[in-house]
Image: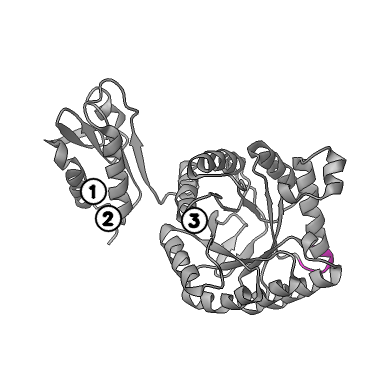
Amino acid sequence: MTRKITKEVHIGDRVIGGGNPILIQSMCNTKTEDVKSTVEQIHRLEEAGCDIIRVAVPTMEAAEAVSEIKKQIHIPLVCDIHFDYRLAIAAIENGADKIRINPGNIGSTDRIKAVVDKAKERAIPIRVGVNSGSLEKDLVEKYGGVTAEGIVESALDKVHIIEDLGYDNLVISIKSSDVLMSVRAHELISEKTDYPLHVGITESGSLYRGNIKSAMGIGIILYEGIGDTIRVSLTADPVEEIRSAKLILNELKLRHDQVEIVSCPTCGRTSIDLIALEKQVEDMVNSMNLKPMKIACMGCVVNGPGEAKEADLGICGGKGEGLILRHGEVIRKVPESELISALRDEIIKDGFTVS
C-alpha cells in the first residue's frame, strides 16, 4: 500500500502526518477531575503501547486537573471539549497538547476565535471532529439522510471556519458507526484535504463486535493509504483498544513490534485441549517482555510441523504429550503438562526476551 503524505503536525513530543508512523490513541473513561484514577489508567495505557491519550473536559475542575495529570504521564494529552469555549481555553492554559472540538457546538465566531487564538498562542493543534450522529439538519436534508458526503462537507465547513481565523494547525476526525460509510467518507475527504486524519469506527460496540467492526473499517481505510492516527473504540477496558490497534497495524505491516501467534482451528484429529493451550500461550506471551516473533500453536502432528515452518517457535499437541518446534523442525518431545514451560525456555534460549 502507498500512504498518502499529509501535513506534519506536532502533538507534544510526537509527530503525525508527513509519512511518520501511524500512532495509536485511546480515551480515558475515568473522571478527569479524579487525577489519581486518571493517571493510573494512563500509566496502564502507556504500558500497553498507547501513543496519545484523550480525556474528557466537561467541567472547569477537569480543565484545571490537566496540569497535574500532565506532570505524571509520559505521552501527549488531548482534551475533548463540547459546548463551552472557556473549558477549551482553560485546558490549553493547563497544558493540553491538543484539543478536540466541534466548532459547530462551541458557539459564535467570537468564541471560536478565542479558542483558536489561545491554541495559536501555545502552538497546539486543534482536532476538528464530526460524527455521523451530530450531522447538521440542513446537511441531512440536502443529502437525503446521513451520508458520507454530508459528513465530509460538515467537517470541511468546520475546517474552513478555523482557517478563516488564520490557523491551520489541524487534524480532522470523521467517524460513523457504519463501517462502509466511514470508509467512503475517508476516501472522499482524503481527496479534498492534506490535513492528517484520525481514523476510527465510532461507537463500534462490545469487545467482540467492536473489534470486528474496527478491524474491518480501520483496516480498509489504512490499506488504502489513508490515516495518520487510529483509535479502536470499544465498550471495554481502554487497554483492550490498544491491544487491538497494535494487532491491526501489525497485520497490515505498518508496525513490526508484536508477537504473532498462529493457531489451527480444532478438528476431529485434535487430541489435546487446544483452546485452553492457546489461551495459556497468549497469557504467557502477555506476561513476558518479548521481541517481535511468531509462535505456532498446533493441535496435531498431521499438519502441525508443516504449518509451523514460518514460525520461530511452536508447540504441537498430541495424546498426553506434545512437540516443541523451531521453524517446523522438532526440537524435542515433552509431556503435555510441560509444553508451556518448555516453550518458555526456548523463547528465552533463542534470545527473544527484552532485557
Look at mark 3 in the image and give the residue it sits on. 238
Q: Which residue occupies 32% across, 35% down? A: 310
Q: Which residue is mark 2?
A: 353
Q: Which residue lies at the image location 46% right of the left edge and 41% below the top edge?
A: 251
Measured Cα–Cα span from mark 2 to mark 1: 7 Å
Q: Residue 228 location, x and y as percent? A: 60, 53
Name above or below for residue 278 compared with residue 40.
Answer: above
Residue shown at 71%/75% (left/top)? 89
The answer to whether the residue labelled 2 contacts the one labelled 1, judged by CB atoms less than 8 Å apart, is yes
The residue to which callout 1 is attached is 347
Determine whether, in the image, residue 11 is placed left or right of residue 144.
Answer: left
Quarter of the image where one finds residue 321: top left
Instruction: Tell me which numbered mark, 2 or 3, is placed earlier along the sequence.
Output: 3
Question: Closer to the camera: disc 2 or disc 3?
Answer: 3
Do the residues bearing badges 2 and 3 touch, measured as CB atoms within 8 Å? Answer: no
The part of the chain drawn in magenta is 163-167
Report whether 255 appears left or right of 172: left
- Mark 2 and mark 3: Cα distance apart in space: 26 Å
Examine the rendering and report whether any part of residue 74 can be seen. Answer: no
Res. 205 in view: yes
Q: Residues within 10 Å of mark 2 (few under 14, many from 20)?
A: some
x%, y% of residue 272? 22, 30
Of the numbered discs 2 and 1, the one sitting upstream in the chain is 1
The amino acid type, in three-letter code, at marker 1 is: Ile
Name the amino acid type tagged 3.
Pro
User: Regarding mark 1 in the picture, which secondary structure is present there?
Assistant: helix
